[in-house]
Image (spheres, rainbow, N blue to C red):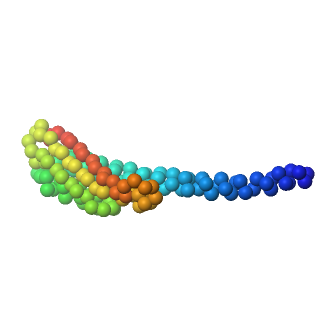
Amino acid sequence: MLRRLRSWRSERGAVVVEFALLLPLMLTLVFAVIELGSAWYSKQMLVSASREGARLGALYDGADDAEVEATVAALLEQAGFPGTVTVSSTGAGGSTGDLVTVSVTADHQLLVLGNLIPGLPSRITLSATTVMRHE
């Protein structure tokens, strides 16, 4: 019985050392999943807004490029999109068969990973472009 107790005590420090070595790697992995998930969510918001803008420009005859850009910017603002967004639209208000193109671009900041991993930029540019045929 005494022999087992000594054996268990001799391995106690090894678990603490292994935990101390793996903790930074595990935290980096957790923050990477959180921040990349946030970037993916922001990208999907841009895609959705560009689709709605292209749909507006393709379906409604009275919509011009300025109205499409304002609508896309308002959608992203209502959704609580962080940061500034650049919206460009071409072809809205055209004739049947013309292409309507809506492009949305925004910067996304990686708060933890950009500072934690050397060489990784702290800002990435997200963009979405949708092209629809005017009906």
Residue 7 vs residue 124: left or right?
Answer: right
User: Residue 113's image quarter?
Assistant: bottom left
Q: Residue furthest top?
A: 97
Query: Would residue 73 be visible to someone looking at this image?
Result: yes
Q: Which quadrant of the view contains residue 13? A: bottom right
**Along the viewing direction, whichever of 1 and 99 lies nearer the viewer:** 1
- Number of disc labels: 0
- Residue lying at the far left of the rendered structure: 95
Of 71 and 102, the residue lying toward us: 102
88 lies left or right of 117: left
Where the C terminus falls, by quadrant? top left
Q: Residue at x 22, y 49 (%)?
A: 103
Residue 47 in picture, x, y percent from top left: 30, 48
Residue located 81% across and 53% down the image? 8
Residue at (71% x, 54% y) in the render? 14
The residue at 89%/51% (across/down) is: 3
Task: Tell me, yes or no, if residue 38 can be seen here.
Answer: no
- Residue 30 position, x and y percent, is 51, 54
Please indicate whether residue 95 sits to the left or right of residue 89 in the image.
left
Counting from the top left corner in percent of width and height, residue 39 is at 38, 53
